[in-house]
Image (cartoon, rainbow, N blue to C red):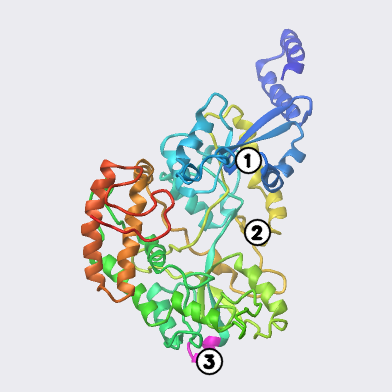
Amino acid sequence: MKPHNKKIRRVVAGGMALSMLVPLLAACSSGDNKDPNNRHTLRIGTMYGSSQDEYWFRQQYTDLFEYSHNNIDIEIVPAIDYTENQFEEPEKQQQPVDQLAKVKAIMTGANPVDIMIIDQPSLLSQLVQENLVKPLDPMIKEDKIDTTAFVPTVIDGIKELGGDNQLYALTPTFMPSALYYNKTLFQKAGVELPTDGMSWDDVFNMAKRLASGKGGKDGTYGFTFNQWGGSDPYSDVTNYVAPLKMKIYDDKAEKMTVNTDQWANAWTKIVDLYKNHVVPTQEDMQAIYSSQQNNDGKGIYNPYQNQLFFMGKSAMMIGQYNMLNDIETFNKNYEKLKMPKLEWDVVTVPQFTNEAPGIGTNINLSTLSAINAKAANPDDAWEFVKFMNGEEWAKFKSRSSYEMPSRKAFIKPRDGMTYNLDAFTKLKPAPQKSLSETKIEQERQNLYLIGQLGQTEFNKVMQGQKTVKEALKEFEEKGNDLLQKIKLKPNGPIDGVGGDVYGGGGPIMYRG
């Protein structure tokens, strides 16, 4: 604006009406936005990063914007810099980082970032609750942006994060999941093909009909919870119940809430799937792996040897959108591997049709771009958010084979592939943790020990040492005692409780 101040004063002095001055100022502003001599700096915050890998972020997200806005310089500011503790002792490096505190520091400091790129949806909810990000709805309305051009899964999912039916961020891409199925195995078993909208019970019952039931290297399995199979069964329970918002302990983290019929039902279903070899156990996976070794103990090279779906040994699996890449590569090279071509398709992931209809699992909203409520350059910030989520950006980014575009017009099947594309866009993401849940987990980092205790008790059921009811009763009793210890010692080692507090990993050895 400064180069034009004299001109404006001359206009006013010449007696022009104020009503004529306003559009002149607007034109001046518009001209400045294209004037490379009138430079702005737009500060963009990221969750993680460092100066060494900044180039990747710029290639992905800012180069196109800078090219088309040649008067705006982009400064990348990571909330958590990888290099900060690079030379610390290993124990200190393993200590958990308070992500919210780090993000708030770059949003509220002396030189706050204008935009925050958020990869964890629950964090956006926290920032909304603390009034740290601006609602985008007024700007969306003013610029007449049609939100119906976006996948409802994305728009509805982001609105739920805000809690007041407003949009506090937008994202150009998202990572949905679907239920992939092997047509050949269904035809051999004489089982009808899956359809969109199936419940978890529908899928589990179908999987039981498809499984051979004998396990091991010669077994055929009905279902896997992920692409790799042989996963941690306790984690499968956690992912399975995510849409139901079932809690392990109360809001104050003082009392366990697991000794219930609802939890018993969930544990029983997952345990039965593994025990009956409907889902492969880790022992099954090891037997399959061993069967692929030569007599000299060396493995026969096969890049898909740990992926039962490609080997024709798993009829159904939950996979993310980017699994299409693997299928495309496999079906171009199956003859080299001396394996059958994969005949496949997808339907929507299973859902709880009564308790949580329309809610899916493994649907991730990432790269959420939000405007800092304290942004020094809110207009430039909105220009970036608008550009990043606009049609031109979507046109370029729709070529990505890893994430699905948020704009419906740019969602198309891969060249040469035919499948049920709608399966990826029909369901909404599972609810995120509440602000109170996230806050208490940050204040009491030892709460992760409750999860390890649950894993220990669940493993006892898997090994036949306890019934589900016995394990849940034990989990609740020991958990109540552990919660009180965590309340007194929220962080750091706790007397009488084994395990690496900061490392995690293995099951907890509870001694009290």
The residue under label 2 is 409
Residue at 50% from the left image edge and 29% from the top image edge: 108
The residue under label 1 is 50
Which image quadrant is residue 84 in?
Answer: top right
Q: Nearer the viewer, residue 400 or 476?
A: 476
Q: Could one spot residue 320 in this view of the protein?
A: yes
x and y percent of residue 25 in the render?
70, 22
Asked if residue 281 is positioned above or below residue 431 in the image, the reply reads below
Residues rendered magenta in the picture = 185-191
Q: Residues within 10 Å of mark 1 (few under 14, many from 20)?
A: some
What quarter of the picture does the N terminus occupy?
Answer: top right
Whole-angstrom CA distance, mark 3 to mark 1, is 52 Å
Asked if residue 1 is positioned above or below residue 247 in the image, the reply reads above
Of the two numbered discs 2 and 1 in the rendering, the one whose residue sits closer to the viewer: 1
x and y percent of residue 41 in the render?
68, 29
**Of label 3 and label 2, which has the lower sequence position?**
3
